[in-house]
Image (cartoon, rainbow, N blue to C red):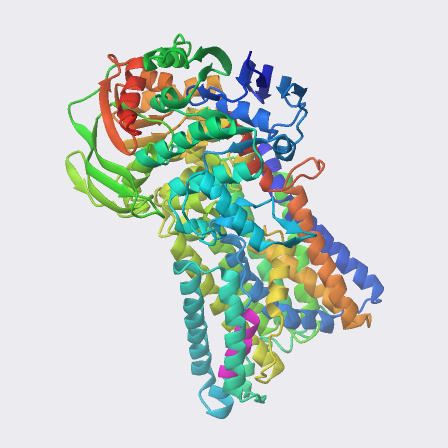
Amino acid sequence: MTKKLLEMRSITKEFPGVKALDNVNIAVNEGEIHAIVGENGAGKTTLMNVLSGVHPYGTYSGDVFFDGQLCRHQGIKDSERLGIVIIHQELALVPYLSIGENMFLGNEQHKRGRIDWHQTHQKAEEYMRIVGLQENPHTLVKDISVGKQQLIEIAKALAKSVRLLILDEPTSSLNESDSKNVLDLLLRLKKEQGITSIIISHKLNEISYCADRITILRDGATVETLDNQSAEIPEARIVKGMVGREMTERFPSRSRVIQDEIALEVKDFTVYHDLFTDRKVVDNVSLRVHKGEVVGIYGLIGSGRSELALSIFGQAYGTKASGTVYKYGEPLELNSVPDAIRANIAYVTEDRKGSGLILSNSVVHNITLPRMDFVSQRGRIDKDLERKTAEHYRASLDIKTPTVDQLVENLSGGNQQKVLLGRWIFSQPDVLLLDEPTRGVDVGAKYEIYQIINELVEAGKSALFISSELTEILGMCDRIYVMNQGRIIGEFLASEATQEIVMNCIMQDSKGEIGA
Amino acid sequence: MNSMRTTFRNNLKQYMMLVALVALVIAFQVLTKGVLLKPMNVSNLIFQNAYVVILAVGMLLCILTGGNIDLSVGSVVALIGACAGTFIITWGWNPHLAILICLGIGLLIGMWQGFWIAYVRIPAFIVTLSGMLVFRGLTLIVLSGLTLAPFPPAYLAYSTGYVPDLFPALQLLGVRNTTSLLAGIFIAIIFCVTQIMGYLGRKNKGYAVESIWALILKMAVISPAVIWLFYILASYRGIPMVLIIVGIVLLAYSYFTSHTVMGRHLYALGGNEKAARLSGVKTKRMLFLAYVNMAFLAAVAGIVFAARLNSASPQAGQSFELDAIGACFLGGASAYGGVGTVGGTLIGALFMGVLNNGMSIMGISSNVQQVVKGLVLLLAVAADVISKNKLPFNIPRFGRRDLKGQQTVESSSN
């Protein structure tokens, strides 16, 4: 009888307006690799946050047992003391510190407050040997590859005498050989040191490769736990569990208004990473959007969808962009955001607070910002016209605010999103690049936003609709491109596509990655 | 009505500061047994604070870009004074020409600092700290460590002079300078007329307007205050020239920040740089221009201040940057950028000025004065961070970081 190292019973966690976890049960045996899979938003990250104490005891209901003991974590420190270490998707290394310093960050090798550098570096070398890394512990972290950085994270966990290692999307930014390296390390640690791990991943082939058991989450609830040890589970079976829900959301219908004319065409678009300028983020993408068409781009987080849209939008992202953008058949020179705005292209950001709205400004000021020239003459703002314009969008988009002078930070998420949409509709675009336009808004507001999009395309505009919610893509779009690792890997008519087909497309593409 | 409440709420901090300023004036008026508001002292207050107001307006634009400050303005003031002294006193240049060249030097200094800050992305704090040392050093080199004096009357007239009395014989209401009184009445009338015209214009076009009583109250408070100020000036030596310079700067920048596209872009840049960039704001250029403008106004202040001292001194302008920064924050500018007004900055500068002047009249030692000023500044900014415009006054959380906190909750729920 194998011993249960971790058991989470009936975990329910609510955020204002959202039930992120609904009665989730999961049990992890000692010495196994347990995979957790699910779509974006299924609750994987929240579940791990409950486990590691990011959401402290008392803010969720249900019980967490570790090693037979009930856990009442108040913070990450508490879970780490028990040997639960979580490695996030975004690596938490300090780039300007050395490997050795990073490995013992927060866990410094010291005698009465004085750091013992000799011991630090000697131990760092020891742990690096375990994870199979040959580097000088004095090397700065910024000077080594992402793959090696991931190994250092694992070594860092080992240095904390880890008992349960949690890896959130450990291979999402790694290439094939580095990914395989990490997975093999996990298998080796399991065999040699008896370390239990939980791995969260979208890459099902990797999960089949290394996991002993697989728990599937969907909409914040556990669907099932499958045993991968005795007989390998077919990927299709996992996909079915992940997406096998009914189409519960309703989408407003629109009359079919697609015209032959191509509104936006992108040819051979390639963009490199902003900082790591030798990493391709968008890889030779070509696509087209007809007038009156909603075209979806589906891809997992990190597939390069936002980067693609941003770089079309006047190279607002990336370096060394190459390729051509045509609008209504005319090639465009889009070297800056103002160029793109003047070419009547709009980009509605996925991060409305971070890069969308000016929260400290009023609704009026936010709406008119991109095209101040519409409401001004020779640099002088016509305040009356500006106000009238804002009132127009407040009425037509049903933005709920006492007045248009209200600061945007005082509005609800859904209304903020409508202000953002209002801004870009005001900019008179022919083509809208909508990046996650319904993120973080409630169901009612979602429906209204869908209606707004329908009205826009019915008025002869075109939309590129980026989303991580597959149901939304299937419900709203006429045609769908599937993106993975910066490339377009599939194109479907929405009428012919299903969740299984799209997910399989991504799985097939990710396959060759670990060469296993 | 709703609209007015929102406006009121948005400007609450400014109103509070205005009330605090009035209270401060009354308190010192009592404590100094009426000396504070004696005509000569009011005139003094204007001369003492003119350059602080000019610097603070420039500083406001820098702070608006995202809480960036300019530490070099005191040194720039000194350097411009040194240049003016050298050109006019040592080399005997025409004062008008020399002033134009000094303003040009100010622009060059601004372009130098703006280039490093906006295009090379070196933090403003570091660039202007360097500027503080460099320009102070250049001042010492230009002056060889000596003080140049005195300036010719043609130069002094720009800032230490008074507007000549056009009707010396009239002595209306028994004041010494009738022109000043008439100017005050004229300004009050212009103010009321533009207010009423604006009100009627908006009403005719069917836009939301404030209640008629709010308009009347506004006119009933401001017009007499203006007339009273000019009456006091009239009973001394009239309108100081420098008041006209300050008035032009205030009007121009208040118009710039509230009625022009570039002004709007400045607020957007400070409110959220990424969002501003994605909305087509040329963020680097705005940042550059803010610093060019700052040094230009520092040059204006330098010319005014050299005239007030009637000398070019290597030690001029020490710690002026702190007065200017203090005035902005007291006046409700946000230390994170994107929030602040020219009107608020004026109030902040006057608050500091009255505090200085009042304590000096009372004979409080300058050591204690510094402690008081420092604490006042801290309290004002603390109030900004804590209340963050939130009404009713709930128990403070952590200002802006709150927003980010909410965001992580949302994204982790995805």
Q: Is residue A485 above or below residue B154?
A: above
Q: Is residue B308 above or below residue B147?
A: above
In front here: A442 or B92?
A: A442
Where are the magenta residues, as a range?
B73-83
- Seen at 65% across and 23% down, the residue is A59
Q: Is residue A428 visible?
A: no
Q: Measured from the top left, where is residue A353 in percent x and y? A: 48, 36
Main SS of the magenta segment? helix
- Seen at 71% across and 35% down, the residue is B394
Picture quarter with the N terminus of chain B: top right
In front here: B146 or A320?
A: A320
Q: Is residue A165 visible?
A: yes
In front here: B327 or A85?
A: A85
Q: Measured from the top left, where is residue B19 in percent x and y? A: 72, 51
In front here: A256 or B311?
A: A256
Q: Measured from the top left, where is residue A436 in percent x and y? A: 39, 28
- Seen at 56% across and 20% down, the residue is A17
